[in-house]
Amino acid sequence: MSQAGKQKILVTGGTGFTGSHLVKRLLGQGHEVLVVDNQPGYFYEELKALGANITIGSVTDRELMFHLVEGCDVIQHLAAAFRRIDLPKEVYWDVNVNGTRYLLEAAEKHGVKKFVYSSTCGVHGDVDNPPAPETAPITPADYYQFTKYKGEEVAQEFIERGLHVAILRPAAIYGPGDPERWLMLFKRVAPGRFLMFGNGRATYHPLYIDNLVDALILAAEKEESKGQTYLIADEKYYELNDLVEVIADVLNVDVSVIHLPFWPLWLAAVGCEAVCKPFNISPPLFRRRVDWFRQNRAFDISKAKRELGYQPKVDLKTGLSETAVWYRENNYL
Ligand SMILES: NC(=O)c1ccc[n+]([C@@H]2O[C@H](COP(=O)([O-])OP(=O)(O)OC[C@H]3O[C@@H](n4cnc5c(N)ncnc54)[C@H](OP(=O)(O)O)[C@@H]3O)[C@@H](O)[C@H]2O)c1
């Protein structure tokens, strides 16, 4: 139980990847947890059985948000239009900007004590001088990241009006329960031959899910977080070549990394997006995905350590091993 005792906490996006882990931890700490998400997700039954009060609904439903927020002490706002690349721009705006505004309005009206908004490290785009601190230039690389930053600007309005809001910018989250981006990496390393587009020297900053949950909870507990923005990541960042080696080590395979030129892949992604758009098909290749090979994503987490007492406890090898176990147990690998 936290220092503040038992609290009523609303987790938006609470049946998603991060949300499920956070909800389980909060229930384990004895809190009353409300969840709102637009879909039941992988862990729905488990979360319900543990005592989560789950509403299937959208953060874009203003009335519903005002209803759910009433009586809450804390809001952990994780819901986002994020994983799907084929959504119209209006959906990203509606969910990531308007939805954030409705929750903040409801928090202000109902006297919520702490509001934690999960933004993204992606608001910094391709980092010029890694590792980037929170004050690094804001250069979102795509519309999703742009709307997450617009959500931050909405949060700033409420901070100026006195609401206790903390903004977290998580790095690349991984761990048991995420059947997407990192699974793709595992699957591409597993055969022992990894195609690396470009020189593989771009930096990447992982964030193990349990480390992120620690940070979310600290941000909701500490008075110091009021009005502050924090980059959250694991202790170390990696060059892509090294990251592939660690994954190979965890999978117990010898991997050879084959380097291919980056720009033909990027042009193929542009073409793929252009061809798929008129037919409303999700493109198999798109710029956000291929930019993984090129963009520097490495962050300075010293502010979160200093002010929140954040200390990433799980290192990459341990986290990846836990993740591989989950993938195997659930027949993804
Ligand atoms: N994963 C990363 O590497 C990463 C890095 C930096 C920041 N973040 C941010 O961290 C947060 C959590 O990420 P995650 O990886 O846990 O994402 P996730 O698994 O996609 O979880 C987000 C949840 O929100 C739901 N959602 C989407 N639109 C909604 C709406 N209108 N109303 C209610 N729920 C809605 C999603 O449902 P659908 O699946 O149906 O969309 C999903 O269940 C997000 O805010 C994301 O922007 C993620």
Image: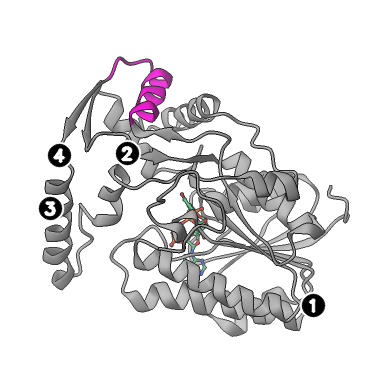
Question: Is label 2 in contact with label 4 (beta carbons under 8 Å)?
Answer: no
* Residue placed most toward the observer, 90 or 52: 90
Q: Which residue is mark 4?
A: 261
Tell whether 88 sits left or right of 307.
left
Q: Does the segment drawn in magenta span residue 215?
A: no
Q: Real-space Cα distance between discs 2 and 4?
A: 20 Å
Seen at 40% across and 18% down, the residue is 249
Of the image marks 2 and 4, the number of the one nearer the N terminus: 2
Give, as a single range, the part of the protein colored magenta: 241-255
Of the image marks 1 and 4, the number of the one nearer the N terminus: 1
Question: Is label 1 in contact with label 2 (beta carbons under 8 Å)?
Answer: no
Amino acid at dot 2: Met
Q: Real-space Cα distance between discs 3 and 1?
A: 50 Å
Of the image marks 3 and 1, the number of the one nearer the N terminus: 1
- Where in the figure is residue 300, as x and y percent of width and height? 56, 45
Q: Which residue is mark 3?
A: 268
Dominant SS in magenta: helix
Q: Which residue is mark 2?
A: 184
Q: Nearer the viewer, mark 3 or mark 4?
A: 4
Q: Nearer the viewer, mark 3 or mark 2?
A: 3
Tell whether 33 sits left or right of 126.
right
Give the quarter of the image for residue 91: bottom left
Of the image marks 3 and 4, the number of the one nearer the N terminus: 4
Q: Nearer the viewer, mark 2 or mark 4?
A: 4
Amino acid at dot 4: Pro
Which residue extends farthest front? 129
* Residue placed most toward the observer, 67 or 126: 126
